Image (cartoon, rainbow, N blue to C red):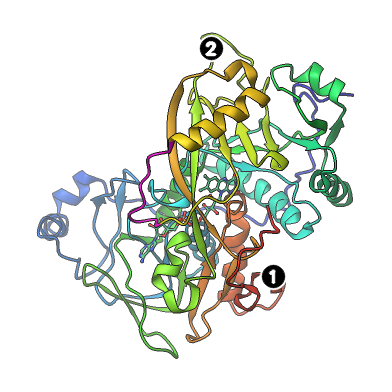
Amino acid sequence: MLLCALAGNISLLRSSGRWTDCHSYKHPTPTELSSGDSGSVAIRRLALGCAATSGLLYGQVDPIMREPMRASETDSAYDVAVIGAGVFGAWTAYQLQQSGKRVVLIDAYGAGNSRSSSGGESRIIRMGYGADEIYTRSALRALRLWQEFFAQINEPLFHRTGVLWLAHDYDPYPERCAETLAKVGIPFEKLTTNELEQCYPQIGLDRIAWGMLEPDSGALLARRAVQAVVREAIKNGVVHLQDSVEAPPGKGSLDFIKTASGRRISAGNYIFACGPWLPKVFPDLLADRIQPSRQDVFFFGTPAGDQRFTSPALPIWIDFKDEAYGFPDLEGRGVKVAIDRHGPPFDPDSGNRVVTEESLLEVRQYLVRRLPDLRNAPVTETRVCQYENTSNGDFLIDRHPEFANVWLVGGGSGHGFKHGPVVGEYVAARVEGSEEGLEPRFSLATKRKSQERAVF
Ligand SMILES: Cc1cc2nc3c(=O)[nH]c(=O)nc-3n(C[C@H](O)[C@H](O)[C@H](O)COP(=O)(O)OP(=O)(O)OC[C@H]3O[C@@H](n4cnc5c(N)ncnc54)[C@H](O)[C@@H]3O)c2cc1C
């Protein structure tokens, strides 16, 4: 039976219920804050740009989180300081707090900011990873954790659009995906070109030999999802600061970190989850081991009233042999299309985030082939983001070789977003000192200085 409109009720994602209930920390309201002495003192301190010096913190309207955040004392001691509130840092802070740790989460530009790799509109969560079973299993668990999280906060930030792999002749990657999904027990459907034509007449099948649909996969609304994780973490007790952390000097055991605004923050462990900034924070160690690449992303407007390019008529599609992928029109943003090939080197702070004419031309040529009825569609939005590539695409999650209590977390390499909840669990286990499930592929030792992409 065909799964044209994702009508199937197949679901393997049964909960095993690791997730615990949230604590119920309630932020002081602005009125509460301003009514008492401590509130007005705190507000005065804020106005003066001072750090709070005592007690339970104060309310400050965080422009990103749009709710009061708590600030720490200068020199407060935490169990863990997480630097970077992208998807990896946000989930790490969340999971560590759930396991009872006192956590401070610090981000230079704010959670899900437009320069961060996690700051995009949407990210694919798919199960297919060729023969790479570790990522397939991780994606499966991550999807469940994301769904549980969204149910808990009552926000629909996952769209079950389905993910359609478009396979060319002599295209081993989708073949390996199908084998791994079958082995792990994840539902999928192989489609002939005739079936593809019937189900998705809007997709041009030039050079396509067959397809494979993952019906339970789909899109995560990335920026909003990361901000939601941070918001929940703060609600549960994580302290969130917007500040830039300086590179730690020396070696041995790190006593504290310093920030651009002059804070000194001490913690038992420090997790640097700085995504594409990791090579800037640790240039000697990571300059060539994590290479940020520029990636241009386009959204195209669909014809008025035309439902062929929205979900469920159009799923997310992956066309790796043509180095491209796309999303249906979600929430009226337009059909998103991008080239997955690594672009030129990119600086996440100062890189120019205006797309180029060449990349628009390339994406339009792709549209002519794959979504011909959108060949002349207007561009409704563009973004320039960056991948943070390790040599082969495996994540980097390891202890810093020169600091006993510093961890490096990153190398999402254009596919990391979906795994956020599992990366958070993995890092929390490392900080706890557990050796269980240690993955050698995430080690620093396996990261080379040349690019040989193997994980997509
Ligand atoms: C165009 C594009 C498409 C992608 N598509 C997908 C997809 O479909 N599916 C998927 O799973 N993945 C995808 N990815 C990859 C995924 O988005 C990234 O791997 C992931 O978001 C990386 O998250 P991160 O937390 O490591 O880094 P980031 O999100 O970049 O977060 C790092 C944070 O650290 C902060 N920071 C840096 N330095 C400091 C400092 N010194 N002090 C304080 N804070 C600091 C930054 O402000 C930033 O917020 C895509 C990426 C791009 C760019």
In the image, 279: left or right of 172? left
Which of the 4 image quadrants contains residue 147?
top right
Above or below 265: residue 378 = above
Residue for badge 1: 441
Front residue (pair 433, 327): 327
Q: Which residues are magenta?
A: 347-356
Residue appearing at x 68%, y 52% in the figure: 456
Residue 244 image point, x, y percent? 31, 65
In the rendered structure, the answer to whether residue 310 lies left or right of residue 195 reads left
User: From the viewer's perspective, is the residue at label 1 or at label 2 nearer?
Assistant: 2
Residue 155: give its label: none
Q: Amino acid at mark 2?
A: Pro
Q: Dot 2 corresponds to which residue? A: 303
Left or right, 143 with reference to 88: right
Residue at horizontal 87 percent and vertical 27 percent from the top:
192
Residue shown at the point (67%, 25%) measured from the top left: 369
Q: Amino acid at mark 1?
A: Arg
Instruction: Check whether the beta carbons of the residues at disc 1 and disc 2 lie within 8 A of each other.
Output: no
Where residue 328 appears, as percent x and y from the top left, is: 60, 27
Q: Quadrant of the N terminus?
A: top right
Viewer-proximal residue, 412 or 204?
A: 204
> For numbered disc 1, what is the local secondary structure?
helix
Q: Is residue 59 above or below residue 169?
A: below
Mark 1 or 2 closer to N-term? 2
Residue 96 appears at what percent x and percent y?
52, 66
In this orientation, does residue 229 appear?
A: no
Eyeballing the image, is 249 above or below 175? below
SS for callout 2:
loop
Residue furthest top in the image: 305
Count of number-bearing discs? 2
- The residue carrying pointer 1 sits among few (fewer than 14), some (14 to 19) or many (20 or more) residues within 10 Å by Cα, namely some
Alpha carbon of mark 1 to alpha carbon of mark 2: how far?
46 Å
